Image: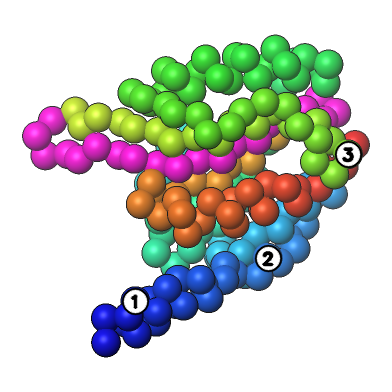
Amino acid sequence: MQKSIFFLITLALFSFTADELVKVKLNKEVTVYIPESFTPMTAEDMKIRYQSYRVPLALYTDDSRLVEFGVNRSFTQWQENDLAMMGKFYEASLSELYDKVTYIDKGIKEVNGHQFVYFEFNSLVYPENDYQDSVKKYTYLMYALSEGASYIFNFTCEKSLQKKWQPTAQKVMSQIQLKN
């Protein structure tokens, strides 16, 4: 009996397949592939989660609102040959944003003919008072420079969901298309 229950649980875990990815053309420069179950984040969600004067190019979330994919663009003075320096700058800023950052992988890589700085990591933010819990997240970030603009691609979920969503995050990030 225990063996059959174990077998059924194992079968259910291995039969899980992430959503199929669907193509989304954000503008004439950027095309991404995201899980088909993701929907655009509402304006209200954006206000609560992202307190910025600049509206992101795109923000998507799953039904639980615990998994997010976003794309930001800003016009910048960085030149495309500054990518490595920009990566060091952003890596330093990540250590200031979180109480603890544990890198899974980081570096520079080419995706569909374009160079990206990337950071895949787990983060921890300690509570500021007795009424809060620690915040633990899994994040995959990629940065790119193109024609005077800086692009930031961000896939984030609760740390407890990392095993389920990490393969999807890696697949999403490996299919970004940025016009050269």
Taking 109 as reference, is 9 above or below it? below
The mark nearer the N terminus, 2 or 3, is 2
**Label 3 secondary element:** loop
Mark 1 neighbour density, 10 Å: few (under 14) some (14–19) many (20 or more): few
Mark 3 neighbour density, 10 Å: few (under 14) some (14–19) many (20 or more): few
Residue at (48% x, 23% y) in the render: 94
Taking 80 as reference, is 34 above or below it? below
Which quadrant is the C terminus positioned in? top right
Amino acid at pointer 3: Gly
Instruction: List the residue tagged with mark 3.
Output: 113
Q: Which residues are magenta?
A: 129-150
Mark number, residue 6:
1
Question: In 3D space, how far apart are the residues under numbered discs 1 and 2 (Cα atoms)?
Answer: 31 Å
In the rendering, at what x and y percent does residue 51 appear? 43, 37
In the rendering, at what x and y percent does residue 30 appear? 78, 47
Mark number, residue 29:
none
Number of the front mark, 3 or 1? 1
Residue at (27% x, 87% y) in the render: 1
Amino acid at pointer 1: Phe
**Label 2 secondary element:** strand
Question: In 3D space, how far apart are the residues under numbered discs 2 and 3 (Cα atoms)?
Answer: 20 Å
